[in-house]
Image (cartoon, rainbow, N blue to C red):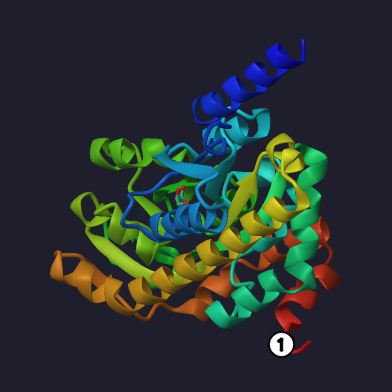
Amino acid sequence: MRIQRRLMLAGLAIMAPAIAMPAAAQTNVTLTHPLPLASHYGAGSQAFKEAVERLTNGRYRVTIQRNDNEREGIEATQIGTQEFTITSTGPVGNFVPDVLILDVPFLFRDYAHARGVLDSAIGQEILTKFSARGLVGVAWMENGFRNLTNSRRDVNTPDDVKGMKVRTMENQVHMRAFTTLGALPTPMAFSELVPALQQGTVDGQENPIPVIVANNLNQVQRFLSLTRHVYSPAVLIGNPAFLARLTPADRALFMQAAKAAVDANRAKVTEDEQTGVAELRRRGMTVREQVDTAAFQAALAPAFQAYSQQFGAANLQRIRDWRPGS
Ligand code: EAX
């Protein structure tokens, strides 16, 4: 018996390399976003991918896919057919109503104000509201200040948008604003936008410079007015079950990767804001850099009254009053 046992152990020792543990298991996670890879969302998703794969030594690999229907990306992340999505807050309010306050027109002074609020307790508090809706708000990213484009005329004052069919996101706050201005808001997913502009179903749309540039909207829109009427946050959303399965150490690595995504995304927005308007002029758009902002804000007074009722005047004022260090 002793000889058999020794022979067996010797045999196992010889075979050991053949039955060595397989290479560390590798898990693939999928992230979708609605824009071209060269966009500000593409920059963020690529940074996320590189950071996850580096920090986990390849134990996790990120597959980036484009889905220009943001609502679909949110739903797929919610049910777990994908692990992450990057989306503007446009459709998010239909899943997490607490987000809608961020979509109020003329709420943010500039990028520093918006980024500061989102990174402060105010923004972090809103991210916690995602979990009750079967989602995880991982990190605030950025879409940018939205500007109006159209194929009909130069737009300087609210009178210029009266009767204009404007595509909006599927967002009640935005739709109320354009209705209050006398425009005809037509909500639709981003995936339907270019065909609607090509077919003349809508006259105009509104989006940040990075989106207009990345999607060559100059090919279907003639006029650009730098209205900057809304700051559009973006958000990295995660699937709750996937994140709950991670060890605390790996979850921390994914959060580190999310920070890298935010930094790359915001840097690309800053870059696009510096070069995008000149590029769109070069591509043939007629650009109005100064619009009558005071007239737009005055015309929106009834909408602001409704937003105060809906979100609480104090909550809106808390955002307006935010300052670095506050
Ligand atoms: O998130 O739908 C929109 O206009 C969004 O700004 C775009 O999908 C980027």
* 77 to the left or right of 62: right
Can you give x and y, in whole percent of width and height, for residue 185 in the image?
49, 46
- Image point (67%, 62%), residue name: 102
The x, y position of residue 249, in whole percent, is: 73, 55
Asked whether the viewer can see residue 110, the reply is no
Residue 300 occupies quadrant: bottom right
Q: Does residue 120 appear to the left or right of 32 in the view shown?
A: right
Q: Position of residue 208 (x, y in %)?
A: 42, 63
Q: Does residue 176 show up? A: yes
Rendered-image quadrant of the N terminus: top right
Q: Residue at x 33, y 79 (%)?
A: 274
**Image-based side of 214 in relation to 103, left or right:** left
Q: What's the amino acid at mark 1?
A: Arg
Tag 1 residue: 323
- Residue 157 horizontal side relative to residue 194, left or right: right
Specify the quadrant that holds the C terminus.
Answer: bottom right
Identify the residue at horizontal 29%, vertical 52% (top origin). 215
Q: Is residue 67 above or below residue 103?
A: above
For the residue with label 1, is its CB less than 8 Å from the closest atom of ligand 1?
A: no
